Amino acid sequence: NLARLRKAGAVVYGVSRDSLESHEKFRAKHDLNFVLLSDPDLKVHHKYGAWGEKNMYGKKVEGVIRSTFLIDESGKVAKAWPKVRVKGHVDEVLAALDELA
């Protein structure tokens, strides 16, 4: 799926609160070939609304809200997908990329 996104002109980044060291281990373990950014103080998560209350196994907890943001060439959020469900998501992002082109 990453190849499909790159072919469509997307640059992919991952963001989490984990440390840079943790990211390097994770990238190596899963053979990831995109950049993982560290946000230990959650500033980016809060700015994008990707941290908050969610349901996990029937309980309300505070944590990362898995999200995707399509940011245009001017740096503005062109489309946001909060609470991402993996199935079919790449196709949704590719369609939005086509609309931007």
Image (spheres, rainbow, N blue to C red):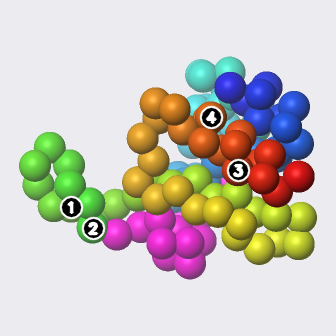
Disc 1 vs disc 2: Cβ atoms closer than 8 Å? Answer: yes
Tag 4 residue: 91
Left or right: 80 as drawn, with respect to 28: left
Q: Secondary structure at mark 2?
A: strand
Q: Which residue is mark 2?
A: 53
Residue 97 versus residue 80 in the image, above or below: above
Q: Which quadrant of the structure image shows residue 95?
A: top right
Q: Is residue 100 visible?
A: yes
Circle 1: residue type: Val
State which quarter of the image contains the N terminus: top right
Tell me which amino acid carries mark 3: Ala
Question: Seen in the image, is 94 located left or right of residue 18?
Answer: right
User: Which residue carries the number 3 mark?
Assistant: 96
Q: Are marks 4 and 2 in contact (CB under 8 Å)?
A: no
Disc 2 crowd rating (10 Å Cα; few below 14, some 14-19, many 20+) is: few
Question: Comparing marks 4 and 1, which lies closer to the viewer?
Answer: 4
Q: Is residue 38 visible?
A: no
